[in-house]
Amino acid sequence: MTEHFKTFSRAADIPGEEWNGLASNACPMMEWEYFCALEESGSVSRERGYLPMHLVAYRDGRPLAIAPLYERDRAWVEFGDGGLIEFLSELTGLPYQHGVVGTIPLTPVPGYRFLHGPKEDPAEICRLMLRNIDTLCESRRLSTSRIYFLSRDAGEMLPLLYEHDYLVLKAGYTLWFNRGYGAFDDYLKSFRSGRRTKIKRELREIRDQGIRIDMVDGAEVPDSVFEEMHVLHLRTWNKHMGSGIRPFLTDSFFEMLSGSFRHRTSFSIARKDGEKLGMALFYQKGGELYGRYWGCYREVPFLHFATCYYHPIDYAIKLGFNTMDPGFGGEHKLLRGYEMVPIYHGIKFYGERKRHIAVSVLERLRKKAAMTEARSGA
């Protein structure tokens, strides 16, 4: 058996059936259509600091594994390391931000993995791809390899990251789990009386205003719903980010979702007297539901919670889904039945001097944090 490797500067240059043939067990955002939508829409581009260099391994002429990768000359808005690479670069003046990143761009969700067929040995594939990521970084004189938001079932990958000299960061992420609920009332019964009463009151206030919320399959909505989702997403962006920062996602991205990814989508749509008040976009696959974007035309108390959490949970229970990912951030989710789970990010430093400086700085930070914690606990 002979193996060779090739990098691609566009996901679209890799046959979709080959990519998705290796992504059958991956989350929907790891599929070919999603990466194409990000890249071909211009949401992910060289201008925005993402230069695709997707690594494909072939064995005897057939695709064996794919590592979706991007060369980055900056580290801003990578979500995974909490600004660590940016901090190291600014502190030392060394180009730690110039590296290769394994991630689902602009999509902070614990779903990244090296794609491979179900009959392959995951550990063997991981070693193979990590070795060749090293080759890529060393040949291009890159400073770091960053692998963000490893999926929660990527247990075999963690010891191999250590084995390949990666620094592994542990973080928290919120997920909802279907604990054998047969109906939404079973979910409500999982709360203590006070919290259950508050959730019921929130839902009652929405109903009393004549607001109806429905979950609709993406295959059943017209293209205009995807266009509206972009408009609502912009409203949410401007509310939280302001107009000074250009939105990450373009209108073409939502248009491409409509054209090639709608089979993975569903919408939670809030209406009053037939008029839309707000919407949230979800992706779904393999018994898992992923909340992504939300927006509203009018601020209504509890509308966000009902549209993005309660009704999607009801939908997930009815369909027998196992989990619901509500999206990145937000401690208020823990009050509504979501649970904190660990996720992991891996960082490797290349070049003896750069590695030594980075490790020294991080060790000093660790010791300082430990001393501060000890003093506060004294």
Image: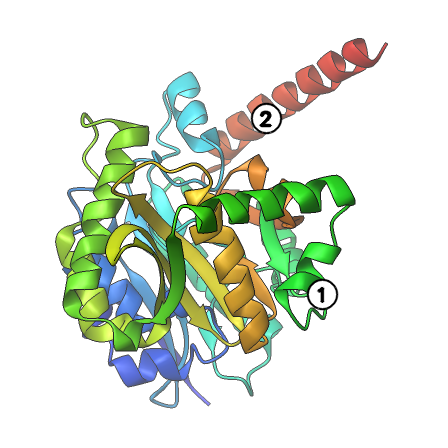
Residue 317 horizontal/vertical position (percent): 59, 70
Q: On the picture, is 2 further left or further right than 276?
A: right
Q: Residue furthest right?
A: 378
Position of residue 122 relative to residue 109, above or below, is: below
Q: Disc 2 residue type?
A: Leu
Question: Label 1 belongs to which residue?
Answer: 179
Give SS at disc 1: loop
> What residue is rendered at 63% in x and 19% in y?
364
Residue appearing at x 47%, y 67% in the figure = 114
- Structural crowding at the residue carrying mark 2, measured as other residues with C-alpha within 10 Å and reported as few (<14), some (14–19) or many (≥20): few
| Visible residue check, residue 337 | yes
The colour scheme used to paint the residues is rainbow
- Mark 1 or mark 2: which comes first in sequence? 1
At which x and y percent is residue 100?
36, 49
Which residue occupies the foreground of this view, 291 or 146? 291
Q: Which mark is residue 372?
A: none
Report the front residue among 176 and 156: 176
Q: What's the CA distance linking mark 1 and mark 2?
A: 39 Å
318 is higher (above) or lower (below) than 173 = below
Mark 2 element type: helix
Amino acid type of the residue tagged 1 in the rendering: Arg
- In the picture, measured across the screen, residue 286 lies left or right of residue 8, that is right
Image quadrant where one finds the C terminus: top right
Q: Position of residue 143 (x, y in %)?
A: 39, 39
Q: In front: 24, or 297?
A: 297
Which disc is residue 362 wearing? 2
Q: From the viewer's side, name the closer residue of 242 and 63.
A: 242
Residue 71 in the image, given as x and y percentages of width and height: 30, 49
Nearest to viewer (mark 1 / mark 2): 1
Label 1: how many Cα within 10 Å (few below 14, some 14–19, many 20+) = few
